Each structure stands twice: as C-alpha cells, then as structure tokens.
C-alpha cells in the first residue's frame, strides 16, 4: 500500500519538479544571455527575467512609467521584449521623426496592426490592403470634412447631446451620480452615427446595435496582436458581431439602390446629402473599380469604431477634469456669454468654435495629458541606421514611438503633469520645427513629426482630419 502511495506521489511530483527545473534553467540562460557583450550596433536591452514574456507586465501596466524609467537608464533608444518580439523604442522628437516619417520600404504598419484590426474592421480595407489602396480609401472618407459637412454636423451633434441629457435616467433630477465613461461612450456613438453616417444608421443605434458594437470592441484585446484566431469566447462574439453589422450596412446599401431603381433621377433624400454611405457608393478606385459593397460596409464599421473610441475617452476625461475645476467651468460659461452673447436659448454654430479659445485649450490640454496614443509601432523591413549614432535597427525588430513622452516632458511643457488649459495662452507662438508638407495620397498636410504635441500621431498613418473631428 505504501509503495502504491509513493508511486502516486512520485508520478505527481516528478512532472512538477521537471517543470520547475525547466523554468529555472530557462530563466538562468535568459539572464546569462543578457549579460553577454552586445554589438555596438545593437541598442541597449532592457533587463527581464522571464523569456518570451519579457517586459510585458511592466510595459502593459503603465507604458509611460516604463518608458520613463528605461529612458533614465538607457537613453532615448532601447529594446525591450514583448511576448517574444523585440521592440526597439526611440523616444523624443528625433524618434518621432525617424519612425513616423519612415519610408514605406523601411517601416511597415500593416504587419503590426492587421492581425488586430482586420477581424474587427473587415478585410480589404485599412491595414488589410496595400498602402496605396489605403491612401485612396482615406481620400474617399475625407468627404466628411468638407466645409459644408462640418457646418451641418454642429446642430446634429448638439441635438443628440441635448436629447440624451433629457432622456437618460441618470441625468434626471437636480442631483445624482453619473457614470461619466459610460455616458460619454453612448453620447459619442450617437453623435458619430448621426453626423458621419446618416439618419438611417443613427436610427439603427438601438440596444441591439450597441451590443454588437460592444462585442466588436472586445476584439481589441492585447492577446489578439499575437493570436487573433484564438478560439476565445470574446473572439467568437467579435466575429458574429462583425458579420451581423456588415449585413446591416449592406442592407442599407441595397435599400439605397432599390430607391434609385424605382426613381427616374437621383433617389437620395435630403438626409442623404451628407451621408457617408451615399458618398462611398459613388467612389471609384484609380484602376476604375467601383468600391465594392463589402468594402463600403467594412469602412462604415471602421468609421463608427474610430469615431467613437478616442472621442468617448477624451470627452470623459474632459468631464472629469472639469468636475475637479469648477473655476474653469465658470470661465467656459462666461466665455460663451461674452463672446457669443449666449443666453441659454440660441444653438451653437460651426463658426462659433473660433470664438471660444478657452474651450479649445481645454480640449488640447486634455489630449496632451490623456492622449489615447501611448505607442505607435512599425515593423522594420530593411536595416535602418539611426542618424548620428552607431545603432542599426534590423528587420527582427518592431520600432516604437511614444508621443506621450514629449507630452509629459518638462523639457517642452512646464509643470507637465498638471492639467492647465491656460498654459496654451502663455506659450509663445509655437515655432514650427517641421513646416514641410507632403501628400501621402489623400491631401496635402504637414509632416508634423517633429512637434512635441502629437495627440493623433503623425506621418502617413496619422488620424486623418475628419476622424480627429469626430472622435478624436
């Protein structure tokens, strides 16, 4: 009997002991490898105990603190390990310029982001297509940034916000508690849907549609950078939600075509005049191909997701910051009274925006401190020498820029960690360090890569202007 028990114990403990020994040896060899002399062309490696996992925990917990501590030890350029990938970070203005203004043959965004975004947005758009095609798609959706379109959005957005406040249970009464993040997420999806996507889409933003959006949003999980195909419950819900949402948009497209077939002329009603679906249905690629319905549906999904994400979080931060600064709230109100003659009755107009500098500075300051971008990544395609250094970044690396590092740097912003909208009034007229312009295929724009303030990134993959108006 005793021998039987010992056999059981041994059969259990031996695999455990073997696993412990294997883990110990792998950690030991990993540490010893890091102690070996490195080539002068290799950036410093951030120390880590666990192979493969590397620095994932400290980076994922607080990217800004991780970057700051690594910078103190290694300087602006260093490499860390993230689930087996070598991530080479280049901080500061020079790093932003080197990475975000890199040539297509040297750096590639598609290989990094496609596994994460394609299951959510859909195939043949954004990062699941050649860069030249992406530039054409960006040009198509800039339709939403015409002066006429922007002017038409203001009353639509204002109405959505007022309707929400009047109908949402949490806003009823003279006092109470509000989940600011949830409320701003709902408001933003309604305003983005109505302004950019049209009345038909807005009418479909029901509880069911919101649930589909939520399931799609769950597709943006860190693990999906590595294993987007993993048979996880959230990925199954993501795929089902994508298929359902795509069918909704294709149904709207078919309804538009049926209206055209039944009429002798242009069948669009007045609500379609600034409608993105109507615009995309008329778009043609340079090769003469009409934009396929599937791609229209996928681009509409992308616009809804992109038009909600950053702006809901930024709006929530604005509300929370203002809640802590009633003095700024009063200043904002007095600015409207003084500059617009506001009496609580008249609606907001597009041209009023230029008359509210403090409001603009509140937005700018919130985006500086609470930027939704902490890491911008590019896959290295060809060896790249870092100017004025011995470092050569090889194709086994992923390059990482981090705009939040300059946003929160005392070098560029006094008392950088303090939320102070008035700082933008005190700052001297910003001297443009990067005045070069370029057309990546969707309109002339400033390269902008050498600015210390990049809330929406820079270079060919920056958020294009219409997106920064709607979420962003």
Image (cartoon, grey):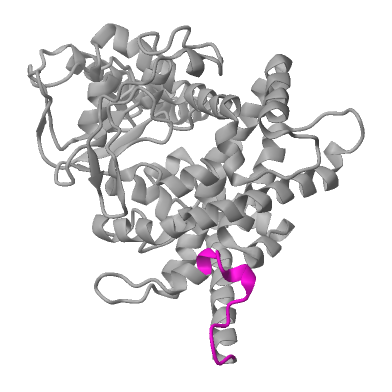
* Residue 345, placed above or below residue 159: above
Q: Quadrant of residue 412?
A: top left
Q: Quadrant of residue 101?
A: top left
Residue depicted at 47% across the width and 53% down the height: 145
Image position, residue 375 (x, y; %): 37, 30
Of the pair 205 and 321, the residue shown nearer to us:
321
Image position, residue 407 (x, y; %): 41, 20
* Residue 214, placed above or below residue 274: above
Residue 427 painted magenta: no
Q: Which residue in the rendered view is the most extreme toward the right? A: 173
Residue depicted at 72% across the width and 26% down the height: 333
Give the quarter of the figure containing the N terminus. Answer: top right
> What residue range appears in magenta?
263-277
* Residue 212, placed above or below residue 60: below
Q: Overall secondary structure of the magenta stretch? A: loop
Residue depicted at 65% across the width and 68% down the height: 200
Image position, residue 470 (x, y; %): 54, 46
Of the pair 55 and 35, the residue shown nearer to us:
55
- Res. 196 visible in picture: yes
- Res. 87 visible in picture: no
Q: Quadrant of residue 427?
A: top left
Residue depicted at 35% across the width and 64% down the height: 124
* Residue 467, placed above or below residue 313: below
Q: Is residue 62 left or right of residue 349?
A: left
Q: Is residue 30 left or right of residue 416?
A: left
Image position, residue 163 (x, y; %): 79, 49
């Amino acid at each position: 009997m005793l021998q039987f028990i010992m056999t059981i114990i041994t059969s259990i403990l031996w695999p455990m002991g073997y696993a412990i020994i294997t883990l110990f040896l792998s950690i030991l060899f990993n540490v010893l490898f890091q102690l070996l002399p490195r080539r002068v062309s290799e950036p410093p490696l951030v120390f880590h105990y666990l192979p493969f996992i590397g620095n994932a925990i400290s980076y994922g917990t607080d990217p800004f603190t991780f970057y700051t501590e690594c910078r103190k030890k290694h300087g602006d350029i260093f490499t860390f390990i993230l689930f087996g990938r070598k991530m080479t970070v280049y901080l500061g203005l020079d790093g932003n310029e080197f990475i975000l203004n890199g040539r297509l043959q040297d750096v590639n965004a598609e290989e990094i982001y496609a596994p994460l975004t394609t299951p959510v947005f859909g195939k043949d758009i954004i990062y699941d297509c050649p860069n030249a095609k992406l530039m054409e798609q960006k040009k198509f959706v800039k339709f939403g940034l015409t002066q006429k379109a922007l002017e038409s959005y203001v009353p639509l957005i204002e109405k959505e916000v007022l309707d929400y406040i009047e109908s949402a249970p949490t806003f009823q009464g003279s006092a109470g508690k509000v989940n600011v993040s949830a409320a701003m997420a709902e408001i933003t999806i309604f305003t983005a849907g109505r302004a950019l996507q049209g009345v038909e889409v807005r009418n479909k933003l029901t509880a069911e549609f919101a649930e589909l959006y939520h399931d799609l949003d769950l597709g943006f999980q860190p693990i999906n950078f590595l294993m987007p195909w993993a048979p996880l419950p959230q990925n199954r819900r993501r795929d089902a939600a994508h298929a359902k949402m795509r069918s909704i948009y294709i149904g709207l497209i078919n309804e538009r075509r049926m209206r055209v077939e039944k009429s002798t002329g242009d069948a669009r009603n007045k609500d379609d005049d600034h409608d993105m679906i109507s615009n995309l249905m008329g778009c043609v690629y340079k090769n003469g191909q009409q934009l396929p319905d599937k791609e229209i549906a996928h681009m509409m999904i992308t616009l809804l997701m992109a038009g909600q994400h950053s702006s809901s979080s930024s709006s929530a931060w604005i509300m929370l910051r203002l809640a802590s600064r009633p003095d700024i709230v009063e200043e904002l109100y007095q600015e409207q009274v003084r500059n617009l003659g506001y009496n609580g009755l008249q609606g907001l107009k597009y041209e009023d925006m230029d008359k509210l500098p403090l409001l603009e500075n509140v937005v700018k300051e919130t985006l500086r401190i609470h930027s939704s971008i902490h890491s911008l990544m590019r896959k290295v395609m060809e060896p790249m020498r870092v100017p004025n250094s011995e470092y050569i970044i090889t194709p086994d690396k992923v390059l990482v820029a981090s705009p939040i590092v300059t946003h929160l740097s005392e070098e560029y912003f006094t008392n950088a960690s303090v939320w102070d909208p008035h700082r933008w009034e005190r700052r001297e007229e910003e001297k443009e360090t990067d005045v070069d312009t370029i057309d990546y295929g969707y309109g002339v724009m400033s390269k902008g890569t050498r600015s210390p303030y990049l809330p929406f990134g820079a270079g060919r993959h920056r958020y294009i202007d219409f997106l920064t108006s709607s979420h962003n």
